[in-house]
Amino acid sequence: MHRYSKLLTTLNAKEIKVRQPIGLLKLLAVTLVLPIVGGIASPSSAGLKQKSQLTVEIKGLKNQQGQVCLSLFASSRGFPSNSSSAIQSQCVASATMPLSITFKNLQPGSYAVAVLHDTNSDKKANRNGLGIPLEGFGFSENPVILTGPPKFNDAAVLVAGSTTNIQIQLNYLLGG
């Protein structure tokens, strides 16, 4: 009987050792996760998150026909041609001077802007038979355009603080 009680004590000790790390992992997880979840749900922390705005100034407008449309993207999804994937979009008359648009109530982060000088106000990027844009266009960070539109990361701008100001130079591949 003495052997069995010693064996049970050994098994219980091993069982405790096996359970201990799991208990520590749970404690660690709870310790790390609760403050994060609590911070998200806490009304006092919500007021601390400052909203930002992005002001975009358009340069190089060839004429004052039609309108200038801007689409703001928070990710690569739909960038740059699918404006329905944009988190905000705005169009203003091309005759508006200075040509500046502000996107408000933004969380700090990376965004990309696509601009179209929609000379015929049809809200489409018109192209010729070869697929070359007939209207002016541009992107945040003014990436070099060679054979197609830029990737999101090439046009992404960091929005932080209360206001971020950028300039976008319009491109007219066929003279505008």
Image (cartoon, helix red, strand yellow):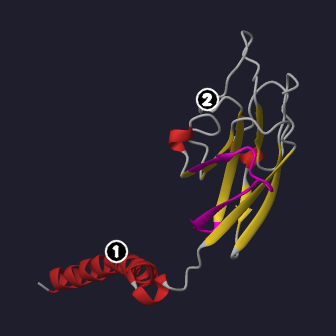
Label of residue 163 in the image: none
Name the residue: 58% across, 68% down.
107
SS under mark 2: loop
Residue identifier under label 2: 124
Residue identifier under label 1: 18
Badge 1 crowding class, 10 Å Cα cut-off, few under 14, some 14 to 19, many 20 or more, is: few
The x, y position of residue 5, in whole percent, is 17, 85
Name the residue: 36% across, 75% down.
22
Amino acid type at mark 1? Val
How far is the residue under mark 2 from the one under mark 1?
A: 64 Å
The answer to if 94 sits in the magenta stretch is yes
Q: Judge depth for marks 2 and 1 and give the one in front.
A: 2
Name the residue: 81% across, 24% down.
147
Q: Is residue 136 above or below residue 71?
A: above
- The segment highlighted magenta reads 89-108
| Residue 165 in the figure: left or right of residue 24 | right
Q: Nearer the viewer, residue 96 or 145?
A: 96
The x, y position of residue 123, in whole percent, is 59, 33
The answer to if 164 sits in the magenta stretch is no
